[in-house]
Amino acid sequence: MAPAVEISHLSFTYPGIDGRPPPGAPPFIEDVCFSLDAGQRCLLLGSNGAGKTTILKILGGKHMVDPSMVRVLGRSAFHDTALTSSGDLCYLGGEVCWRFTIFICLLLQLQAYVMLILDIDLSWRMHKASDGQRRRVQICMGLLKPFKVLLLDEITVDLDVLARANLLTYLKKECEERGATIIYATHIFDGLDDWPRHIVYIAHGKLQLALPLEKVKEMSQLSLMHRVYFTSDFGAFGPQRTVESWLRKERDEDRRRMKERKEKGLPEFDKKVTEGSRVIGDPAKSAARAVNNGWAAGRLASTVAGEENFVFSSNSVLRQ
Ligand SMILES: Nc1ncnc2c1ncn2[C@@H]1O[C@H](COP(=O)(O)OP(=O)(O)OP(=O)(O)O)[C@@H](O)[C@H]1O
């Protein structure tokens, strides 16, 4: 049986204002490969700006890429619009479009079970609902149809502890009982010790690790014994400290690189433009990708590669 989610040598460049990748821009997402079988619960981890949202949006069919690079339920997420319209594939993330969600929710009054889990009160009024209440309604909306693949992009930030715990339990059950597949990008590790079965870690748009949780635990323990890099066991002390150590190592390497560049008299940050060629590796596919590389949602920064500029990742963290 085909995997529920299959990413194969995924490369992606955000397009410039003309809708095409800027000339010479190296891909931001580069050669990412991993796959997940039906029923998997996967945590997608990485620091701010690592590329988690970009990957989830590509998987959710929001950015166009070559169909061979991303398959969801054996189909192209972008080109096969029936995937999302049927509810089989659902991406939940970003800002809450809550006027719409509350309206629809009240209109449909469906999925009483999900509404119960999220404690949604139909007497809530949109001009009075809190951020967390709006978020609950947004999540409920996303779960109205029985999804097969669910992509969650840090949507539990506004939820209180109980709502989050209930939601995680519900999602786990959906995977176990219905064979749904979930990828969950988050920076919050409370209650996640036993939740994921698979871990994917991204840094600077590149895949660092894609392994079953058990393997990550083994690696952590091994490294702990050899006092190398991981500082704790993913299982015994929870994922937070393990992930913290990965991110710390990543940050230290970035700082070291910056220092080296400074010592050599180079600018601290890499210029992203390489002269001449037009984007991505494989020449056979590069023409298709150059045209086929999606659209950029409105951002507060120029998308022209190499511009010294402030850019925001999806969680609006200021970086240069
Ligand atoms: N529409 C866009 N146009 C150009 N560049 C973008 C666009 N969206 C994101 N980026 C770039 O891609 C990088 C990765 O962003 P992304 O939102 O995927 O990161 P993330 O891992 O989800 O971060 P966070 O944890 O902060 O949500 C950002 O640093 C930003 O530079």
Image (cartoon, helix red, strand yellow):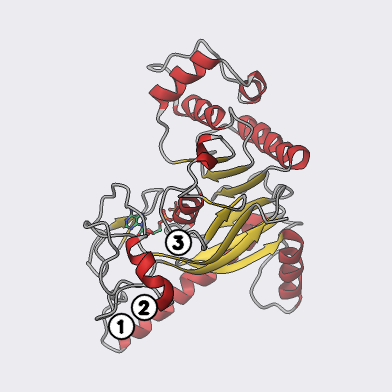
**Alpha-carbon span between mark 1 and mark 2:** 6 Å
Looking at the rendered structure, the kind of residue marked 2 is Met
- Residue 126 in the figure: left or right of residue 291: right
The x, y position of residue 101, in whole percent, is 45, 24
Question: Which amino acid type corresponds to the residue marked 3 in the rendered image?
Answer: Asp
Q: Where is residue 181 in the image (x, y as percent from the top left)?
A: 66, 46
Q: Where is residue 320 in the image (x, y as percent from the top left)?
A: 30, 63
Q: Residue at x 33, y 66 (%)?
A: 290
Residue ranking furthest to the top: 123
Q: Is mark 3 within 8 Å of ligand 1?
A: no
Q: Nearer the viewer, mark 3 or mark 2?
A: 3
Which residue is disc 3 drawn over? Answer: 66
Callout 1–callout 2 Cβ contact below 8 Å: yes
Q: Nearer the viewer, residue 186 or 137?
A: 137
What is the number of the mark on residue 258? Answer: 2
The N terminus sits in image quarter: bottom right
Mark 3 element type: loop
In terms of depth relative to the viewer, which is nearer, 180 or 201?
Answer: 180
Of marks 3 and 2, which one's residue comes earlier in the chain? 3
Q: In this view, does 30 lie above or below 16?
A: below
For ligand 1, which image quadrant applies?
A: bottom left
Would you say the residues marked 3 and 1 are in contact, meaning their CB atoms lie under 8 Å apart? no
Within 10 angstroms of label 2, few (less than 14), some, or many (20 or more) residues?
some
Q: Name the residue under label 1.
A: 262
Tags 3 and 2 in contact by the CB under 8 Å rule? no
Q: Which residue lies furthest to the bottom in this view?
A: 264
Residue 257 position within the rendered picture, expressed as x and y whole percent measured from the top left: 40, 80
Q: What element carries label 1?
A: helix
